[in-house]
Image (cartoon, grey):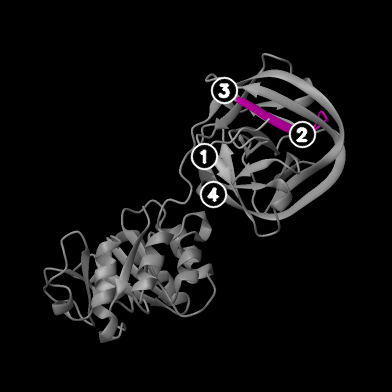
């Protein structure tokens, strides 16, 4: 679980009360100060962190700076603050992160390579790595660095609004989805139409794809091009997704038409177990191709319709992540899909009557 600490040391006194109230309300994990009086009245749900020049006796979590290995070895507590500015202090931060309960690290240079090295060194360690960040943009980067990220971030907010925004960064962005087994009922050759290939800025796993459908009520899990194909190289960043009118499921349960996707848009990668993650679109490529409509039905009787390029190399996923070429599908075959409980208005779920056909 990622967490955030709020640094009160540079927050103007006029904003301090509002910042603390926001930290309590948004359940920020910790508050950092150099004055114990600012921490004494905080509720027990918040970690009270006293950041001081030298270790002291205190009921709060005390973190003091260390600058060399000797200081680290003699440290009376199991928490330290390390400023990384060169190779020596980078090695010190790695040693601290490997053995201490809490290691707060501030990096003086803008590159994230030293952070990646500390994250790698601390991999598997039981302690927590907390990285000092200047703003919300840096916090988002640090929390995902090296696909692992710092366990926590320490940020001095400008005001209470920054606290709430930081808390939202820590929310689970991509909860799992419930997938269902769809049974193919019919296949229809449609002739020429416009289809969209979605090229993302990330690799898909072999059992991952994106959820696409003609109706907002249901989607089919379209396979990425991670599996070998004759006559062409694999493109593990791509999904040959479907006709331009189709809905594609994105983060926060929102849909877009495939025709709306642009470089920088977000889509949801979904694997055969329903685990999801947010991906950034690098390019959406629209071309005219012969089209094929797959009509399937869920166990509850919901009709799911997907129009894709009518070619053998276009694939969807079946139960267990089985790869299925669309031109080889037959009535009775099983696909993986997702049934939505709400209708859509401009991509947002809404509880209204809507019939699609």
Q: Which residue corresponds to the image point at 54% horizontal and 26% vertical from the top-left?
A: 180
Helix, strand or loop at disc 4? helix
Give the percent coordinates (x, y) of residue 318: 63, 25
Give the percent coordinates (x, y) of residue 257: 68, 47
* Res. 325 visible in picture: no
Determine whether label 1 and label 2 are within 8 Å by CB. Answer: no
Residue labelled with disc 4: 251
Dot 1: within a 10 Å radius of its alpha carbon, few (fewer than 14), some, or many (20 or more) residues? Answer: few
Callout in the foreground (4, 1): 1
Q: Which residue corresponds to the image point at 84% horizontal and 29% vertical from the top-left?
A: 190
Residue labelled with disc 2: 308
- The Cα–Cα distance between marks 3 and 1, rounded to whole angstroms, is 26 Å
- Residue 181 is marked as 3
Q: Is residue 263 magenta?
A: no
Q: Which residue corresponds to the image point at 60% horizontal and 51% vertical from the top-left?
A: 279
Give the percent coordinates (x, y) of residue 255: 60, 46
Residue labelled with disc 1: 352
Taking the image as shown, residue 37 lies to the left or right of residue 154, namely left
Q: Earlier in the sequence, mark 3 or mark 1?
A: 3
Q: Earlier in the sequence, mark 4 or mark 1?
A: 4
Give the extent of the magenta segment: 303-313
């Amino acid at each position: 679980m990622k967490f955030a600490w709020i640094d009160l040391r540079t927050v103007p006194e006029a904003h301090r009360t509002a910042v603390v109230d926001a930290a309590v309300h948004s359940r920020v994990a910790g508050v950092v100060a150099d004055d114990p009086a600012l921490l004494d009245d905080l509720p027990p749900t918040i970690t009270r962190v006293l950041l001081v020049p030298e270790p002291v006796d205190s009921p709060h979590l005390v973190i003091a700076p260390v600058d060399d290995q000797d200081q680290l070895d003699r440290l009376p507590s199991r928490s330290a603050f390390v400023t990384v500015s060169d190779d020596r202090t980078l090695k010190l931060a790695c040693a601290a992160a490997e053995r201490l309960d809490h290691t707060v690290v501030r990096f003086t240079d803008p590159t994230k390579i030293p952070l990646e090295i500390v994250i790698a060194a601390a991999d598997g360690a039981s302690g927590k790595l907390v990285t000092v960040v200047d703003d919300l943009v840096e916090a988002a980067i640090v929390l995902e660095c090296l696909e692992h990220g710092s366990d926590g971030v320490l940020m001095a907010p400008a005001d209470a609004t920054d606290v709430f925004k930081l808390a939202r960064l820590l929310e689970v962005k991509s909860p799992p989805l419930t997938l269902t087994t769809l049974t193919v009922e019919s296949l229809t050759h449609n002739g020429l139409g416009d289809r969209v290939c979605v090229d993302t800025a990330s690799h898909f796993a072999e059992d991952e794809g994106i959820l696409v459908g003609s109706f907002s009520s249901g989607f089919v899990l379209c396979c990425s091009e991670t599996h070998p194909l004759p006559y062409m190289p694999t493109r593990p960043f791509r999904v040959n997704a479907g006709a331009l009118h189709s809905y594609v499921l994105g983060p926060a349960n929102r849909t877009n038409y495939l025709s709306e996707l642009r470089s920088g848009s977000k889509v949801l990668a979904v694997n055969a177990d329903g685990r999801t993650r947010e991906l950034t679109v690098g390019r959406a490529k629209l071309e005219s191709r012969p089209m094929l409509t797959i009509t399937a039905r869920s166990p509850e009787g919901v009709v799911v319709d997907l129009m894709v390029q009518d070619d053998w190399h276009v694939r969807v996923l079946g139960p267990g992540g089985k790869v299925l070429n669309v031109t080889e599908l037959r009535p009775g075959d099983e696909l993986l899909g997702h049934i939505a409980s709400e209708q859509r208005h401009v991509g947002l779920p809404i509880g209204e009557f809507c019939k699609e056909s």
